[in-house]
Image: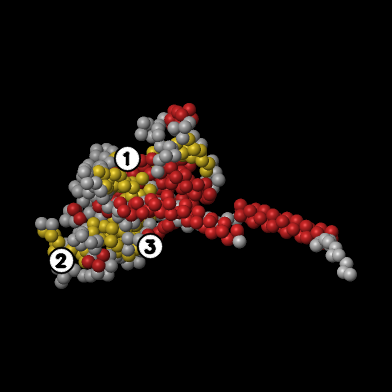
Amino acid sequence: MKEPLQDHPSFSAGRKFSAGFHVLASTVAMLAVVLMVNYLATRHYTRRDLSSAAQWQLSPLTQRVMQSLTNEVRVTVFFNPDRDLYTQVISLLKEYMAINPKLSLRLVNPRTNPVEAQNVISQHKLTPGQDKNSVIFECQGQSKVIPAAWLLDSELEQMPSETERVFRKRPTAFKGELAFTSALISVTHPKGRRAFFLQDHREHNPISTDEQVGYSKFTALLLENNIQPELLSLLGSAEVPVDCHLLIIAAPLDPLPQEELDKIARYLDHGGRLLVLFNNNTMTKRLGLEKVLANWGVVVGENLILDDTRKVEKSRGRQLSLNTFGSHPIVDPLNGSTVQLLMPRSVSAVKSGTPSADTPRVVELLYTSDQGLAATDIRDGVVYVNPARSVRGNYPLMAAVEKGTVRGVAAGRGSTRIVVTGDSFFLSNQMIDSGANRDFAGHAVNWLLDRTELLAGIGPRAVREYKLNLSQTQMVAVRWALLGGMPGAVLFIGLLVWLRRRK
């Protein structure tokens, strides 16, 4: 007779204790690993921008500004969260905060928090255009208000309509990083610089919004770099001001009197900084500036430079897109980019023998290709090229000059620095955003002011829009797929699972 089977425990007490101990030890070890990984991650972490076109990756300039930040900066986002820009603004500012925690963020919703909103309006004296959506930077009593209108470039776009003409503002570029980094520099370095535009000789107007000859966008670039633009007349007994950090001569059309040329020469002898631009309108005129520049080793050609291999389409060969650069801090960051000029003149270094210690150092910045041509014959707006007299080659179109303190002269400003360009229209409102023109302008200005830490510029970021055009039939199909197809698929899968489990 067989004995009845007896129930035996599947695990003895020892085995249960051993299994429990191993589970506990594994759990503790896992927690320890997680804690160590997080501890190391807080001190040694890397952020990567995986968005399309790396739209949130900050420029080298912004990274340097944030890494050098030593004072606490508070940023108030005075914004309605319903605005399309709100998410972009917050996301961008979080990238700033990830570099340096000294930048703190405060969110104020003017709709849901009217009391705090009114305090912000009163404290910063916001105007009606700023009192709804603005970003405010504050540091040690200094503040900078950035209205939402500054953050976005847009253009009018006609919408499809069968009944009437309907337009909308289509965003083209987001300028958040440009505005925010400029504000940071402004509030952390409140002592700005002053740039004076010479007047009285039909130069480009720095406040004009005219597309062809206006310079208002270039003036805005100066303000973004914490440089205060001013107008300057040297008529009569007026001299270049002592606090002139940069003198800008933007393509005069009329010759300068000798007394003004003498004042400019004295300014340069005392360590002055000069940005002087020429254009094709004066290629047959002598403005007087040519002689001043020749004393500093620069020759401005009485010509017009062409290059069929670098011409921009639909410009009839007048606009050139150039990418052959010299070696200089102004243009080194532009390698791989293009600068677009309109009918430029040549600007070259004086060819001389062995330079002495007092000789200015001249570096040619930008060239045509080896197919460049110099034309000197223009009649009734038509350029005539004489193949027998015109030699093809790399023609220089810009130059930078630097010279140390002049012997025997007290120079409180330091070394003299000059940038000369053979075109002025490339910084006009119409062309400054073409190619790397804006970047070149920022680099040139910051080099002239000896602000090497700001030589890597920031440009607007293109806004990409994706459109999906569907017919009425396709819209109905999509609606049924979303409202019926997807929930139905989930129910069908659930039914299959239920039938399988019944078996």
Query: Do the residues under discs 1 and 3 have CB atoms within 8 angstroms?
Result: no
**Mark 1 or mark 3, earlier in chain:** 1
Dot 3: within a 10 Å radius of its alpha carbon, few (fewer than 14), some, or many (20 or more) residues?
A: few
Q: Nearer the viewer, mark 1 or mark 3?
A: 3
From the viewer's perspective, is residue 270 above or below residue 134?
A: below
Q: What kind of residue is marked 1?
A: Glu
Residue at image x 26%, y 57%?
341
Residue at image x 48%, y 35%?
108
Secondary structure, mark 3, is loop
Residue lying at the far left in this picture: please name it: 380
The residue that mark 3 highlights is 335
Residue 276 visible in the snapshot = no
Q: What kind of residue is marked 2?
A: Val
Res 230 label: 1
**Mark 3 or mark 2, earlier in chain:** 3
Secondary structure, mark 2, is loop
The residue that mark 2 highlights is 385
Q: What kind of residue is marked 3?
A: Asn
Which part of the image, by quadrant, shows the N terminus?
bottom right
Residue at image x 32%, y 63%?
323
Whole-angstrom CA distance, mark 3 to mark 2, is 31 Å
Q: Is residue 286 or residue 337 the one in the foreground?
A: 337
Q: Nearer the viewer, mark 3 or mark 2?
A: 3
Which part of the image, by quadrant, shows the C terminus?
bottom right
